[in-house]
């Protein structure tokens, strides 16, 4: 099929219904609030292509300062696939940022396109799920060690050390929403972001979230290579249900090395945020 000439445009909250239709058709967990949050965080970084009178494809790019940009919500309406829309949106998103590194979490469907665009595999990332979340004390009778809590300031510091980039804008929005440790989703509540230097620190974030969502389905995206994270998820009854690939490419020539430490990451913030 010949490529059509529809061009990327910026998405706004008025596109919410159409954008949500695409993520729902793909079986994703994003609720309306998730789309609105990414549009608020990156008002100039959410793109769509219209074709045949409707929103056909989307992609978002969120910049964390000059160090890192994150691409997400790469979706094409099943009836519009193979027309070059995702490639055009990706090229547009990449061309619009000037950061050391660009990363994303790729589904198997997205992998071939990202490889063609110069992304290489960084590590495996898995979605773990539990059908009915246990209360914290049900699964772990001793609870977080010494009843320790983890402050929100510490959460941001740990996140910076883990990712190597400053996500204070994302954290400010999540904090305002009351969603620093997790948030509702279309199919399941979502645990994360959670970065911590210690298992106890991770539990201090996990436990209140599980107690809030006791008996409900919960998703948790983690790196299987982080045995502490996978062990904690297993201890609370979570099981792996999907595997994706974290990918990276330089955004500029001679990019600055990211001082990141994935061993600190217990739960990512979301596939659209890293
Ligand atoms: C992945 C997805 C966004 C691709 O959208 P699309 O608009 O059909 O992609 P394009 O038409 O721009 O194709 C891009 C390139 O990837 C290739 N490609 C796309 N899907 C492919 C597949 N499943 N296998 C092999 N190659 C594929 C195309 O041949 C094309 O190559 P070219 O540009 O060199 O010709 C779409 O399949 C989708 O929405 N999938 C479900 C959601 C998803 O998994 N998104 C990715 C999230 S990381």
Image (cartoon, rainbow, N blue to C red):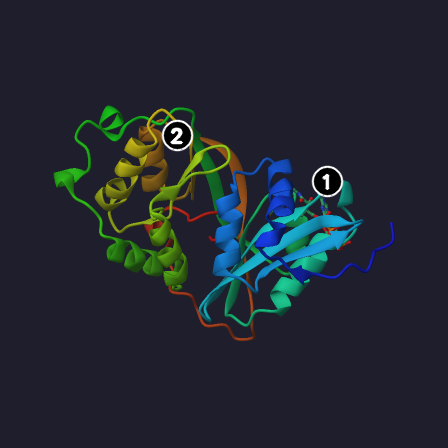
Left or right of 149 on screen, residue 215: right
The outermost residue toward the left is: 146
Relative height, residue 70 to residue 205 (above, below): below
Which circle marks residue 107 in the picture?
none
Left or right of 76 on screen, residue 268: left
User: Which picture quadrant has residue 267?
Assistant: top left
Position in image of residue 117 (x %, y %):
66, 60
Relative height, residue 187 to residue 56 (above, below): above
Residue 139 can be seen, yes or no: yes
Position in image of residue 42 (x %, y %):
52, 61
Relative height, residue 236 to residue 185 (above, below): above
User: Which residue: 31% across, 37% down?
Assistant: 209
Position in image of residue 184 (x %, y %):
43, 38
| Element marked by disc 2 | loop
Which circle marks residue 78 in the picture?
1
User: Which picture quadrant has residue 253?
Assistant: bottom right
The outermost residue toward the right is: 2
Q: Are marks 2 and 1 in contact (CB under 8 Å)?
A: no
Q: Is mark 1 within 8 Å of ligand 1?
A: yes
Between 219 and 212, the one nearer to me in the picture: 212
Residue 110 can be seen, yes or no: no
Relative height, residue 163 to residue 252 (above, below): above
Per the image, the residue denoted by label 2 is: 238
Between 100 and 136, the one nearer to me in the picture: 136
Position in image of residue 256 (x %, y %):
45, 72
Q: Nearer the viewer, mark 2 or mark 1?
A: 1
Cα separation, mark 2 vs mark 1, equals 30 Å
How many residues crowd around disc 1 within 10 Å: few (fewer than 14), some, or many (20 or more)? Answer: few
How many residues crowd around disc 2 within 10 Å: few (fewer than 14), some, or many (20 or more)? Answer: many
User: Which picture quadrant has residue 145?
Assistant: top left
Left or right of 69 on screen, residue 180: left
């Amino acid at each position: 099929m010949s490529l059509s000439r529809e061009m990327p445009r910026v998405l706004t909250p008025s596109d919410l219904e159409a954008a949500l239709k695409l993520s729902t058709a793909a079986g994703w967990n994003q609720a309306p609030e998730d789309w609105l949050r990414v549009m608020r965080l990156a008002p100039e970084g959410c793109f769509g292509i219209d074709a045949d009178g409707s929103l056909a494809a989307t992609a978002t790019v969120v910049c964390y300062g000059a160090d890192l940009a994150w691409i997400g919500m790469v979706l094409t309406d099943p009836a519009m696939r193979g027309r070059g829309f995702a490639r055009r949106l990706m090229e547009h998103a990449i061309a619009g940022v000037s950061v050391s590194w660009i990363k994303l979490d790729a589904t198997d469907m997205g992998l071939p396109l990202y490889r063609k665009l110069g992304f290489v595999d960084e590590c495996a990332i898995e979605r773990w799920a539990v059908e009915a979340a246990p209360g914290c004390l049900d699964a772990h009778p001793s609870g977080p060690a010494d009843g320790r809590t983890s402050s929100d300031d510490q959460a941001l510091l740990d996140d910076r050390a883990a990712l190597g980039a400053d996500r204070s804008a994302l954290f400010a929005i999540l904090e305002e929403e009351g969603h620093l440790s997790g948030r509702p989703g279309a199919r399941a509540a979502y645990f994360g972001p959670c970065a911590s230097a210690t298992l106890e620190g991770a539990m201090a974030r996990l436990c209140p979230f599980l107690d809030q969502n006791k008996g409900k389905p919960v998703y948790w995206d983690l790196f299987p290579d982080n045995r502490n994270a996978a062990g904690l998820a297993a201890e609370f009854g979570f099981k792996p249900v999907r595997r994706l690939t974290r990918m990276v490419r330089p955004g500029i020539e001679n990019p600055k090395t990211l001082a990141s430490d994935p061993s600190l990451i217990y739960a990512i913030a979301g596939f659209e945020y890293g």
